């Protein structure tokens, strides 16, 4: 059975053309990751703001995931979800409480870092 996943993308909203290119590149990366892992990408949330801006779509995603049947959130890299390690840990723990995994599609190193902030049983 395919894992149901949602994607989250974030790009600096101050660089119009570059921001669009970044979002498109991240989206392709998430689509490729889903295809390579036989996952169903059911929705993608996009914020275009700097690392310290408003994360409206990320907050909507987290709120909606409380009632969704989703196995994982995939991001191009963990920094897209949050650059603040404390806040990143809070997000990951909140999702883990709902049995939702966070997967960084960029590299094995990112998932190693993720294991450092994911609660272990």
Image (cartoon, helix red, strand yellow):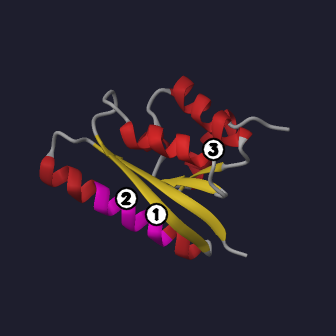
Residue with the mark numbered 2: 26
Secondary structure under badge 3? loop
Q: In this view, which residue lies farthest toward the right?
A: 121
In the image, what residue occupies the spot 54% across and 75% down?
A: 35
In terms of secondary structure, what is the magenta stretch mainly?
helix
Q: In the image, 105: left or right of 68?
A: left
Q: Does the magenta stretch include residue 49?
A: no
Q: Position of residue 22 (x, y in %)?
A: 28, 55
Q: The N terminus appears in which quarter of the rendering?
A: bottom right
In the image, what residue occupies the spot 66% across and 50% down?
A: 101
**N-terminal of the two: label 2 or label 3?**
2
Secondary structure under badge 2? helix
Residue with the mark numbered 3: 66
In the image, what residue occupies the spot 67% across and 57% down?
A: 71
Q: Nearer the viewer, mark 1 or mark 3?
A: 3
Q: What stretch is highlighted in magenta?
A: 23-32
Q: How crowded is mark 1: few (under 14 residues within 10 Å), some or many (20 or more)?
A: many
Q: Position of residue 53 (x, y in %)?
A: 31, 29
């Amino acid at each position: 059975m395919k894992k149901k996943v949602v994607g989250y993308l974030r790009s600096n909203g101050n660089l119009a053309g570059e921001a669009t290119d970044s979002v498109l590149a991240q989206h392709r990366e998430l689509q490729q990751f889903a295809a390579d892992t036989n996952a169903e990408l059911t929705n993608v949330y996009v914020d275009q703001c700097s690392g310290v801006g408003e994360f409206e779509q990320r907050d909507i995603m987290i709120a909606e995931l409380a009632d969704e049947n989703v196995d994982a959130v995939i991001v191009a890299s963990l920094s897209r979800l949050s650059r603040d390690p404390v806040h990143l840990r809070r997000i990951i723990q909140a999702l883990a409480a709902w049995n939702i995994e966070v997967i960084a599609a960029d590299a094995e190193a990112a998932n190693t870092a993720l294991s450092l902030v994911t609660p272990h049983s």
